[in-house]
Image: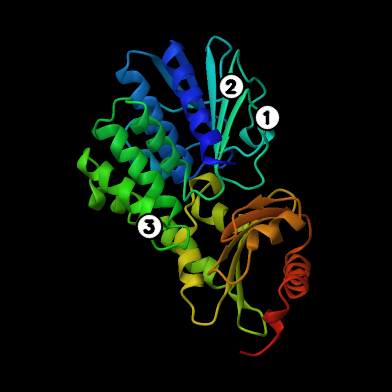
Amino acid sequence: MRSSENSEKKREIARRLRECSSVAITCHLRPDGDCIGSALGLMHSLRLLGKRAEVYNVDPTPCFLKKLPGAGEIKLGEVPPDFQCVVFMETSALDRSGQRWKGDFSIHIDHHRTSEEFADLNWIEPDRSSVGEMVFELLMEYNFPIDEKVATCLYAAIFSDTGGFRFSNTSALSFKYASFLVQAGADPARVSRIILESHRREEIFLLQRMLSTLRFHPSGKVVAVFLFRKFLQELNLQLHDVETETVMNILRSVEDVEIAMIFKELEKGFRVSLRSKGKADVGLLAEAYGGGGHPQAAGFNINLPPEKALQEVYQRIEEMFPWVRKPE
């Protein structure tokens, strides 16, 4: 989309948000740091304008993100019908939100290339590092209030989706906006502790169990671990409570590894989370199985037993990325 079209989208979103006295915001299923931070940042800004603004999610907030300002106010369930506007934050598609009602007027803000234009107003920019970056730009350009709470939440959103400014989606704009947010009151050390250093003891024991399932592709360029439901049961954890980026970062840190995978056991089959160092577009891999995401972070579901699921994905990776089978 041309920049002029994006500017018009932002202008219209800003106008609608200022006109509405009540706004509900909702995230995608299994919410992460980007969508939670973005939703809370927008909520706080709208409240500073005296509006009724609330966040409603179908899935619970991950434990570590509950330390963000306002996270304790997120309501669990569907958006009530008495809001004038509903903002879908990074949901890709309506069913990805778990919501059934779009309200009198709906807005969709996303940065996935596979995102659907299901709302009345859709602002989608796949080249952005995060939705947090987009929301900050919207607030800044159209003079919405930004206080310490807004800044903290939006900084957390950008920090989360750029992997602490380590991933290749990190741009000069990411640093520029992060700088503005720090000046507005965001504390980088505090956000870093929330995102990276808020693990409970049970999660470390879970990490131990997951690493015991470590499997390398014969080439050494692909690595996988399993998160079985029995691990969660043994530690009295729920899947939505667990932050798996730590183990993913460990897998990505292995020399020569280009693709890292976590197979999370569901009631039927597995949810496969994918990460790439850049050589492989794992978004394409996920799309081949009906999933989606970004070139370096994506996911999909597969309904097969553990070993068959792993071998099936290995085979598809070899077909899509022949260099996996070749020695460097």
Question: Crowding at label 3, few (<14), some or many (≥20) Cα neighbours within 10 Å?
Answer: few
Picture quadrant where residue 297 is located: bottom right
Expressed as whole percent of the image width and height from the top left, the position of residue 16 reads 49, 17
Asked whether disc 3 touches disc 2, contact meaning CB atoms under 8 Å apart, the reply is: no
Check disc 1 and give the amino acid type: Phe
Which residue bears the numbered disc 3? 201
Asked whether disc 1 touches disc 2, contact meaning CB atoms under 8 Å apart, the reply is: yes
Specify the quadrant that holds the C terminus. bottom right
Dot placed on the residue nearer the N-terminal end, 1 or 2: 2
Q: Residue at x 56, y 41 (%)?
A: 2
Spatial separation of the CA atoms under disc 1 and disc 2: 9 Å
Expressed as whole percent of the image width and height from the top left, the position of residue 246 reads 44, 62
Check disc 2 and give the amino acid type: Ser
Spatial separation of the CA atoms under disc 1 and disc 3: 41 Å
Check disc 3 and give the amino acid type: Arg
Specify the quadrant that holds the N terminus. top right
Which residue bears the numbered disc 1? 118
Which residue bears the numbered disc 2? 106
- Please name whichever residue, 276 or 69, is drawn nearer the observer in this view of the structure: 276
Q: Residue at x 44, y 57 (%)?
A: 203
Question: Crowding at label 2, few (<14), some or many (≥20) Cα neighbours within 10 Å?
Answer: many
Dot placed on the residue nearer the N-terminal end, 1 or 3: 1
Closer to the eye: label 3 or 2: 2
**Residue 184 in the image: above or below residue 224:** above
